[in-house]
Every structure is written in C-alpha cells, then in structure tokens.
Image (spheres, rainbow, N blue to C red):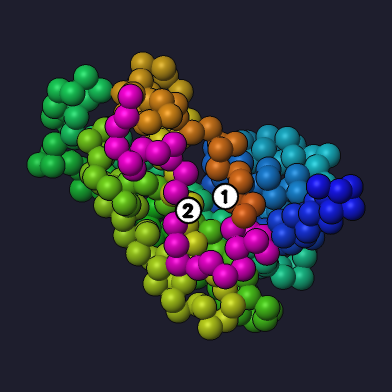
C-alpha cells in the first residue's frame, strides 16, 4: 500500500468512527461499563454527561476524565426517579444545544443462579425461593429504569431533528438460559432486549437508532464486585471458549462503533461481546 493510499485509509477510518463534538449522556456512569463508555467517548472528543446516583463515585469518575480530548460533567440522578433523569437530559441539552447519543447503562444484579460454581444446587436461587421484592427492585432498575431513561431522552432527540443514537446495555442472558446467574436478572434483561427492538421500530422514522450491547460476564462492581474474586469467576472462565471474563475495555469498541457514523444503517440489534460464550463450551 502506497503512502498516499495508507493516509487516505487512515483519514477515512477516522471519519467513519468520528464522535468529536457529540453530546453524549451515560447512565450508571460512575464505574464499570458505564464509565468505560464515558471514557471512550470523552477520549475521542465527545462532550459527556455522566449520570449516576452515587455523588462521591461520580466526582471521582469525572476527575479521571479530565485532560481527554472531550469534556466531562457529572450529574446526580437515579433511573428509578424519572424527574431526575429529565433534569439530567435538560441540562445536557442546555450545555451542548442537543443530545446526540444516549447510553442507557444503569443496571443491578439479582444474585447467583440455581447452580453453584461446583455444579451443586443453590437452594436460595431455586425458583420457588426467589424473592418477589428483589424482582421488583431488579425490574425497577433494569427495565423500568431503562424505559424512563429513553422517555427522558427521546423528546429531545425528536425536537432537534437529525436523529440520535440510543445504546442500551443488555446482556447475553437475553439470548440464552443461565445457571450461575439469577433467573430474576435473566427475565429483566430478556424484557429489556425486546424493549430495544420495539423502540428501534418505533423511532426509525425519526432517524433515532436503538441498539444494545450484550456483554458476557464482565469484571465490574455489579453484584458487590462478585466477579473480581478469582474463585467466583473461575466457573464462568471455564465455560467461556476464550477462558477469561470481559474487561470494561473489551466493550469500548462496540460503544464507539454504535455511537459513530460507522453504524449509520444498524438499528434494533444486539452487539454480542462475550468471548464466544453463546457458542457453548470448548477446550
């Protein structure tokens, strides 16, 4: 490849994945996957509003993003409180004049599944022992919270014209059954996957693209940071063909892709980032 051809290819790639100047809002942004999304957007020149319900963690996250090509602002809001979400969106629009990209990322765990890592039964995770109160909480954050987030952002995207991008953090659990992950979590995320499809169908007319990023098991703070423990993550690692869990960095490419012009004709789908775990076990 000649020097001129290589330069042209590099310029084309830079334009294809260009998010410079975009107004971006991320929920659950103080840590984990949400912070990873905020980081990759900010590092590539976007103006990011980080939304989280934990003020102290949010301040730390915003401080970590200082010095990047873009900018970062923290806003305290709770996805179970729609009024706070509406205020966060209004603030982002006021600061940047529009909202281009929404990452609906906030979510919580529902605990372990009906099997333990050694293959024995976990009676606390048995169907008849599942807590309805826990299910209500998981649905409130993972499903109702995502819907409330979309409801806060969509009117702003419709008003501004020119569409927008909505990227929802789902999970591979919406595509398969689980043994080590609670049935309550799986059910909440399965419904969330269908919400992505419904929203994509409805909003296509307005140029608003709606997609999901479906991670496999990822090392974050979710569930009390359970998967940071090598013993707890060992059975997951054994079952994944690549024999490791995802890091937050493993999801940043998908986030950049779905927020950028590179995905201009993609809506209503899930980008699976799971190390091959949906394929089944391998050697």
Question: Is 12 covered by the magenta stretch?
Answer: no
Q: Could you tell me which quadrant the C terminus lies in?
A: top left
Q: Is residue 175 left or right of residue 226?
A: left
Residue for point 59% across, 36% down = 249
Q: Is residue 13 left or right of residue 167?
A: right
Check disc 1 and report its element: helix, strand or loop: helix
Vertical comparison of 24 with 176: above or below? below
Q: Is residue 206 left or right of residue 212?
A: right
Question: Is 260 covered by the magenta stretch?
Answer: yes
Rendered image: mark on residue 254:
1
Rendered image: mark on residue 214:
none
Per the image, the residue denoted by label 2 is 271
- Outermost top residue: 231
Residue 4 visible: yes
Rendering coords of residue 107 (x, y %):
44, 47
Taking depth in this image into account, of 214 and 281 the one nearest to the observer is: 281
Measured Cα–Cα span from mark 1 to mark 2: 7 Å
CB atoms of marks 1 and 2 within 8 Å: yes
Rendering coords of residue 238 (x, y %):
33, 24
Residue for point 62% across, 68% down = 264
Looking at the rendering, the stretch of residues picked out in magenta corresponds to 258-283
Taking depth in this image into account, of 156 and 167 the one nearest to the observer is: 167
């Amino acid at each position: 490849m000649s020097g001129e051809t290589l330069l042209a290819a590099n310029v084309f790639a830079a334009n294809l994945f260009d998010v410079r100047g975009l107004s971006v809002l991320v929920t659950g942004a103080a840590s984990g996957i949400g912070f990873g999304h905020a980081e990759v957007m900010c590092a590539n020149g976007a103006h990011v509003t980080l939304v989280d319900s934990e003020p102290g963690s949010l301040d730390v996250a915003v401080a970590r993003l200082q010095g990047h090509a873009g900018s970062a602002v923290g806003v305290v809001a709770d996805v179970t409180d729609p009024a706070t979400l509406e205020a966060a969106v209004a603030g982002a629009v006021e600061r940047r004049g529009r909202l281009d990209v929404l990452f609906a990322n906030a979510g919580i765990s529902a605990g372990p599944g009906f099997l333990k890592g050694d293959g024995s039964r976990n009676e606390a995770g048995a169907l008849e022992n599942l807590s309805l109160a826990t299910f209500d909480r998981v649905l409130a954050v993972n499903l109702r919270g995502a819907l409330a987030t979309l409801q806060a952002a969509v009117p702003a995207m419709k008003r501004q014209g020119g569409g927008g991008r909505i990227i929802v953090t789902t999970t591979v659990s919406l595509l398969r059954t689980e043994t080590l992950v609670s049935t309550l979590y799986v059910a909440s995320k399965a419904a969330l996957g269908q919400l992505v499809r419904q929203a994509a169908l409805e909003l296509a007319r307005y140029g608003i693209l709606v997609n999901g990023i479906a991670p496999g098991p990822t090392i974050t703070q979710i569930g009390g940071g359970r998967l940071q423990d090598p013993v707890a993550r060992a059975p997951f690692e054994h079952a994944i063909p690549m024999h490791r869990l995802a890091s937050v960095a493993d999801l940043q490419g998908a986030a950049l892709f779905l927020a950028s012009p590179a995905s201009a004709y993609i809506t209503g789908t899930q980008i699976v980032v799971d190390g091959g775990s949906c394929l089944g076990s391998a050697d």
